[in-house]
Image (cartoon, grey):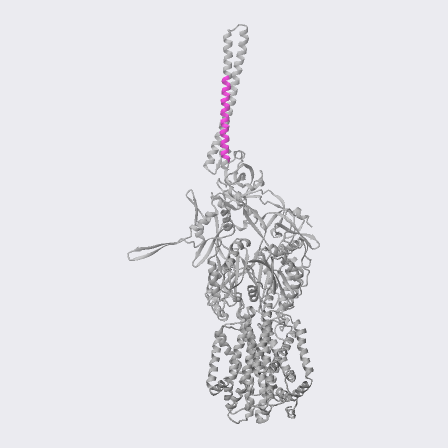
Amino acid sequence: MISGWIELAVRNRTAVLLLAILVSAAGVWSFTTMPIDAYPDISAQQVLVITQFPGRAPEEIERQVTIPIELAMGSVPSLDVIRSRTIFGLSVVSLVFEEGVDKYFARQRVQERLAAITLPEGVTPEMGPMATAYGEIYRYVLASDRDHDVLELRTINDWEVIPRLQRTPGVAEVVNFGGLEKQFSLTLDPRRLERFGLSVAEVVEAIGSNNASAGGSVLKRGDMSFVIRGRGLLKAERDIEDSVVNTIEGSPVYLRDVATVEVIGRPPAGILGKDDQPQAVEGIVLMRRGENPSHTLARVKQEVEALNRELPKGVSVAPFYDRQFLVDSTLHTVAHSVVTGVGLVLLVLLAFLGSPAMALLVVLTIPFSLLFALVLMKATGIPIGLLSIGAIDFGILVDGAVIMVDTIAHHLTRAGGRGKPATTILGAAREVERPVFFSTLMIVCAYLPLLTLTSIEGLLFRPMALTVIYALVGAVLFALFVIPGLATMLFPRGYTDWENPLLTAVRPAYAALLRGLLAARWLVAAAAVAVIVWVAVVIVPRLGFDFLPYLDEGVIWVRANFPEGTALESTAKYADEMRSLIHEFPDVTFVVSQAGRNDSGTDPFVPSRVEMMVGLKPMEDWVSSSKQELVAGIGSRLRGEFPTTRFNFTQPIIDSVTEDTNGTSANLAVEFSGDDLDALLPLARETVDVLRGIRGAVDVNIEQEGPQPQFTIIPDRVRCARYDVHIDDVNELINTALGGETIGTLYDEERRFGIVARFDRTRLSSPEAVGALPVFSQHGTPVPLSQVADFRLADGQTMIARDSGRRRVTVRSDIVGRDQGGFVAEAQAAFAGAVTVPEEVTVRWIGMFENLQRASRHFAAIMPVTVLVIYCLLYATFGRHREALLVLLSVPLAFVGGALALYVRGMTLNVSSGVGFAALFGVSIMNGVLLVEWISELRQRGLGRDEAILRGSLERMRPILMASLVAILGLLPASVAHGLGSDVQRPLATVIVWGLVSSVVLTLFVVPVLCRIFLPGRGEVRPDVERLS
Amino acid sequence: MNSDPAAEDSVTDNVATAPLPAATRRWRLAWMIGSILATIALIAMLLRPTGPGRAEAAAHGSSPAPAAQAAKPEAIAPGLLRIPSGSPLLKRLEIVTLRPETTRQPTAVVSGVVVARIKDGPQPLEDRWQFGSSAISNLYSDFQRGRNEVNFASQQLAKTRELVTAETDFLSGTVERLSGLAQTANIPQKEFLAAKSALLKAQLQGEKDIYAAEADLRTARKNLAAVERSLAQAGAEPEMLSSAEDKMAIISADVPELKIGLIRTDQRCEMRFYGLPDRIYLGHVEQIGSTVTPERRTLRVFLHIEDAASELRPGMFGEVSIGTDEREAIQVLETSVLHLDLQDFVMVAAGDDTWRAKPVRIGEGQNGRCDVLEGLKAGDHVIGRGAILLKSLLTQSFLEASGQGEARPAAGSPASVESAP
């Protein structure tokens, strides 16, 4: 059937060529419209439910908000896990859905459940933005010429910059961090209230009753009508000051008489610092999930340009982090690898063929197959990135073309100008259509099992597998249907092949060596087995197991946890010092610190926590020899200066993504879950001691913050009754006058600012001062708070973390200097011997390690399936078990090179190298197929076994060497690349490159020996075989 | 895998099948050699060391040397930490030596109002009072009237007594004289008896008059007392009004029930008025009220405030700081105080690079400092700013002592904790 199509293609070669050009054009168009990103979005499908409940302790919020929400969400379909974190004033419930769930479906289901929940009055849960940490594509600060303070900058950010950027297509949300939110404050003085006999409630009511507009139908006059409107909204400070509260004997008492009206900054939840600026205002642009990062970024930058022309003088949007640099760097790395790889492929082909035309025939396969793949990638929604285009071995793509071209050259040379070249070429194509098709099919089958990968590894490598499959399909189509037609155009008068003299000179030596090996076949076989066993038994156990190689994002993310209860301002002050310390490293360009959390509630962090983003120079300008060295240096410096502070060093995307997926960003975490935190904490502390004793453990600590001091006001009901004070009155004092709850809104054009009534903070410096504040009885009599309430200064929960309906405490550890698998095994053994876990407590080992276990199990299943599938294809090819098994022996031979290379280069077995092995097995089979198939063919033609082996090996030496070298050199640049984004390619490329090296060496020297051992027949050598050398 | 039966020849045959023209051969050779050399060069370029570290340290500077492995701070016993002298942490800790300080921090801050002042003028002092309300003014008038009535009634009583005494003395003498004459029959018996009768009448009348005068006096005093009570209730203690001096104002302040124990007479006080925010008026506690107001559960305290410039007016409202007498106190920075569970601690030097967490009881804070009521003494070296950085280590020290149980440092009085090992 294929043969018929080839003939059709050759006869209509012009049409086929035009079709190929059309497909290529479609590929180019696809390239211009496809999303390009460094790494695929590996974040889980997640919906956040964020509920702000100001002034409430975590225990209260957990009871009244978090647990009801978790219970309501329990029935949402396709939900994988529910986690939550509750801190002072904030509850964040994270709903992680199963893979493949549509994002709108997920949000719709959550919204339905939210509508039915009953929560305390005034508490409104909201869904977080439709974006993940992966979507943080752009960060900026509002730069100022120092004439604008952080309050003004924050106002500009809130009302001018953010609304504009949020309207940009592709942007899900823009989050503010830092600055002071503008509010209008009625700063109360208890004495002034007492002086006029007024209560806080009356002040609050005054705002409400003096801040409204009205509409009054229409006023008709003649033929005209006038819309009636009453404008009573507060618009300025003066309006607030002139609002009347009460009258005393006919004289009005204004708000300005009882309170100071002033513009203040709302007490911040977080403070941002950048470089030498202790306070700044930041915006973080979140891209909607599934959008094109490059296009979205381009639009954002356009808007920023326009904004910078329109913002007040001296203020500008100054970006400091832009995902484009990662995309560009990665594209640069990929492009470098691709161009160099293609160049090497071309050079190798030229070295073997000596004919640019022939080499070009082969090399044209590469762009065609790439463009073909792009068309299918666009159709199936796979973005261009490091792990799609960057993982393609062009040498593998051209294998089919190499076989086709080599055979065409051979046939044309043999024809010697006799007959029509087109007929000769068609004959050549028919000869190799089956081996080309089947060898490509085998490689495709080797990649197919990778499509079953799930979770993070699936999101990372399924696109890669699909892209390679698409490219292989394109390559085989080009090799079978385009190359023959092109060859008829390029060689209308025929072609004479001429072997590289170097190769010709090597042949006799190879023949002689091969004869010697055949003679000592048992020794050779034993040696081969010994090598394979040695690698399997000695080398592989020393390799170590990791989940993923380091995915360099180009920045460093530092997390520092100060002691619980540290005030936000103190944390920010220490952050200033840390930024200075980090700036001592010349490889650093910027440092931004975020103390506390943002106001939107998406990050439930406490005031004692700092997160810092450290920007780095281009790698070629570094002084440090590697990022690991730089991170170690910075870590050493910070830990030395702040020895009692807990630090973690990671990267922003992988940190957030793994936290969302696994519940922790650590390499390894031990999770204790139960109902009683008092039972969980001691276990966690014991575990910290155990893990700290394991080699490679770094930054071991309990993830959840410890208790922090709480100042609790407890109304005494008996005393309240005596003074005729209701609990509501006490609560009003706490919420409004202490907590600064918003009591009204002031509208300034389209801007809205909250109005708060609160006591002067400078007077609230001690519990006694708070106790002196007046709470008003039902008769309006002020009673000191201390007379109706007790005060308690005691520790309470800083954060309550929950997983699947139970409280959880996790002990985290990062792993440095050794493999994850070995570390975890040692840690688990030590834990089992040292820590006794009660029955009511559940223990789980989670983190990146969890992914490693899952991926290991998956690969343990995939590999045998891959081998089995290949075996079936081999059997289909040869029709005999013996030959099929012989070829299958290429697999362990290839494995040897890959494993040794990992060991020598100090790499571990991880998902990337695992994928490399899967690909390697498919590719290495080709060499064996080429050799064994031809040996079998020669035997069928009547040659003796030894003669067939020798002749077949000699005759197939060139195509095997050519196909292997192009495959090896095609990925060599990727295996030695060090640029940004090369970390995930390198293990994969290393395995394939060096696996192929061992495969080709062992195929040329060991497979013939194995053929001699396993293939039946009498061994003889005909004299004319001598002439081959 | 079947191949075309026509294609039987080996690849080596084609080398010699059709000889290649020499020129073509040369070109092919050139391509082959060139490509081999280019491949080698490209591979060499790929394998040369690249990436970070190539930049000359002199051109780009060098990374800071790794921090010298300074010994880390550690917990060596419950509440006892060692911070080695070379630790960089020390430069973030401010160490302060405690000294007794003179403070005038008030013991209570309440609101007060001017209830009365003495205005300038030539009239007697008692007539120059100005009050904050007409009610008090009327009461004061009643008070003055009542006082006058009491004086008058007293005088009347005295006079009545005098009169009665004089009358009865006179009549007694007459009776005595007539008694002798009657015995000697110099006068009729009837005259003697008449005189005796007159004496008895005069005595009886005298008692009645005295009783009436006393009753008037009692009534006047009761009325005065009632007016005094009303005056006191209205906020103008009569005794204070009586004892006031010129250039003085009387302030009435309401002290919450819970703070009654902190107030003493003659305590110094300071007052700031809303109408005169830049001035501080000095005074003292003159009198403490006798009852707690039922509505607000506050005790009325009366103060004398000096008003040299006669600026104050009745009704002026202000803030009174009571108890501003100078006193010695130990104060620490608020940043020194660490709170763990139920107890406050301050880190005190214990010698040999060690620091002990001493439980303390602290008072009110002001301007970033607070009184230490119990737990520290003058001469102690304590950590001021930066103490918060030691909190986690301190918590750990208590945890280790309690055998990984809940972090509960010994709560209770400083004395009891001091004795803990």
Q: Which residues are magenta?
A: B204-232
User: Percent from the top left, x then y, of residue A157?
Assistant: 49, 61
Examine the residues drawn in magenta and state their main secondary structure. Answer: helix
Point out residue A484 in the picture as x, y percentages from the top left corner: 51, 86
Residue A584 occupies which quadrant of the picture?
A: bottom right
Question: In front: B84, or A78?
Answer: A78
| Coordinates of residue A548 in the picture (x, y in percent) | 59, 70
Considering the image in quadrants, where does the C terminus of chain A appear? bottom right
| Residue A137 in view | no
User: Between B45 and A505, which is closer to the camera in this rendering?
Assistant: A505
Question: Quick check: A895 above or below A734?
Answer: below
Look at 50% across and 6% down and name the residue there.
Answer: B188
As for residue B225 lying within the magenta part, the answer is yes
Instruction: Please check the rendered image and state whether residue A130 is part of the magenta-colored stretch, yes or no.
Output: no
Q: Nearer the viewer, residue B40 or A317?
A: B40
Q: Estimate the x, y position of residue A861 in percent, counting from the top left.
A: 59, 72
Q: Is residue B99 above or below residue B90?
A: above
Residue A1023 vertical placement versus B214 (above, below): below
